[in-house]
């Protein structure tokens, strides 16, 4: 999402100007946050969506895509001639997206999910999304239509395409069929850029139109949230097993004598010539394990955790500084490190190496986890 141009718009009060950051925080970012809070979108992001859910998402997103040109044409009919040209350029790209290669990629994607083109009809909820967006795009003045497409639909589809693409990749879908979603993300990014540019100029000429655009974006979001509920209901109960539970053999079933092939890394604050800390990474599909050995009094570099991490101490004793908390540990202890915090490990022993195993997930935690309060140590 970070590659989308976020354009500054004036507030409803023409005397107040809103920065790009404030505009994102007030409008598009909350829409994305609310959409990503939906259980199905969360399962996609975590690689746990069922095959039936993925099939429903791909099929109904395809049906919605058949109306994209019609929606843009409806919007064009409400805009001033100068603005029409920009949107027409985007429209031409949408038409070009229906070239034989794009159609072949979509069919290839369907077959990778054991589906055939034309095997399903558009659902009532998908039709409702289309009808709601079409109604907004035909409202006079263009503010509602631009809000529906530039804010609501852009936020929804770019988020859905990205998270569904991740779910399909985790489910073992080959890279070739996934090119369909890569192309779709590029088209949404370009349409968002063009329509937001038109919306920016419209707001500068008529600042009060902001309110119309936001209300339209809200209506579109509600329609898509109901659409997600319908996809879940049509797929049936969610099984506990992951959609990516198909066996995929690793590159190596065993890592022999891992410390002998550990890499040497400079220890934090150590002068040249001092023995290096040693570590080796043991990767897998869904988690990452790292075995690290610290010389006496050595420290790791200060890092920021992108994932939740569990540290198991195999030998020695030391301390882990997690933000402002210092957690001392010794052999046999397990230390929890939340996501999105800064941490550093230090060997406190003068005459003994420290050896620990760090295990973390490869999927980022859905939200920052509060650092736990220090617990009194048992005697």
Image (cartoon, rainbow, N blue to C red):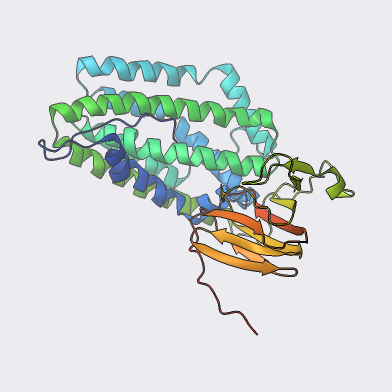
Above or below 343: residue 108: above
Q: Is residue 154 visible?
A: yes
- Could you tell me residue 119's position as x and y percent? 60, 38
- Which quadrant would the C terminus be assigned to in this image? bottom right
Q: Is residue 242 visible?
A: no
Question: Quarter-wise, where is residue 6 in the image?
Answer: top left
- Could you tell me residue 317's position as x and y percent? 71, 65
Question: Quarter-wise, where is residue 194 in the image?
Answer: top left
Could you say which is closer to the camera, residue 46 or residue 253?
A: 253
Badge count:
0
Could you say which is closer to the camera, residue 112 or residue 352?
A: 352
Asked whether, in this view, residue 131 is left or right of residue 166, the answer is: left
Could you say which is closer to the camera, residue 318 or residue 88?
A: 318
- Which quadrant would the N terminus be assigned to in this image? top left
Above or below 190: residue 115: below
Could you say which is closer to the camera, residue 160 or residue 334?
A: 334
- Could you tell me residue 179's position as x and y percent? 61, 27
Q: Residue at x 76, y 49 (%)?
A: 246
- Could you tell me residue 115's position as x and y percent? 65, 38
Q: Residue at x 44, y 43 (%)?
A: 126
Give the residue furthest to the right: 256
Give the residue furthest to the bottom: 379
Above or below 1: residue 201: above
């Amino acid at each position: 999402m970070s590659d989308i141009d976020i354009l500054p718009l004036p507030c409803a009060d023409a005397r107040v100007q809103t920065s790009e950051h404030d505009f994102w925080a007030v409008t598009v970012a909350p829409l994305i946050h609310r959409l990503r809070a939906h259980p199905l979108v969360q399962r996609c992001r975590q690689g746990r969506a069922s095959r039936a859910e993925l099939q429903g998402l791909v099929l109904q997103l395809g049906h919605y895509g058949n109306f994209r040109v019609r929606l843009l044409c409806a919007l064009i009919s409400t805009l001033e001639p100068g603005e029409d040209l920009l949107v027409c350029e985007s429209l031409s790209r949408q038409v070009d997206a229906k070239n034989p290669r794009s159609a072949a990629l979509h069919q290839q994607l369907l077959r990778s999910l054991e589906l055939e083109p034309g095997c399903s009809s558009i659902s009532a909820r998908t039709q409702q999304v289309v009808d709601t967006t079409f109604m907004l795009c035909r409202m006079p003045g263009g503010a509602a239509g631009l809000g529906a497409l530039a804010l609501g639909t852009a936020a929804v589809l770019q988020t859905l395409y990205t998270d569904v693409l991740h779910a399909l990749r985790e489910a073992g879908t080959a890279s070739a069929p996934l090119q369909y979603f890569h192309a779709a993300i590029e088209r949404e990014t370009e349409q968002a850029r063009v329509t937001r540019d038109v919306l920016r100029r419209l707001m500068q000429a008529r600042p009060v139109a902001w309110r119309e655009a936001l209300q339209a974006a809200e209506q579109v979001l509600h329609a898509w949230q109901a659409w997600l509920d319908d996809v879940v209901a049509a797929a049936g109960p969610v099984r506990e097993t992951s959609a990516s539970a198909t066996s995929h053999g690793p590159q190596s079933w065993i890592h022999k004598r891992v410390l002998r092939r550990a890499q040497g890394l400079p220890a934090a604050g150590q002068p040249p010539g001092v023995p290096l800390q040693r570590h080796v990474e043991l990767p897998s599909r869904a988690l990452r394990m790292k075995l690290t050995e610290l010389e006496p009094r050595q420290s790791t570099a200060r890092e920021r955790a992108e994932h939740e991490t569990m540290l198991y101490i195999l030998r020695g004793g030391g301390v882990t500084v997690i933000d402002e908390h210092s957690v001392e540990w010794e052999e046999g202890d397990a230390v929890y490190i939340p996501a999105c915090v800064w941490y550093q490990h230090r060997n406190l022993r003068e005459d003994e190496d420290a050896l620990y195993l760090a295990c973390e997930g490869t999927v980022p935690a859905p939200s920052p986890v509060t650092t736990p309060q220090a617990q009194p140590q048992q005697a």
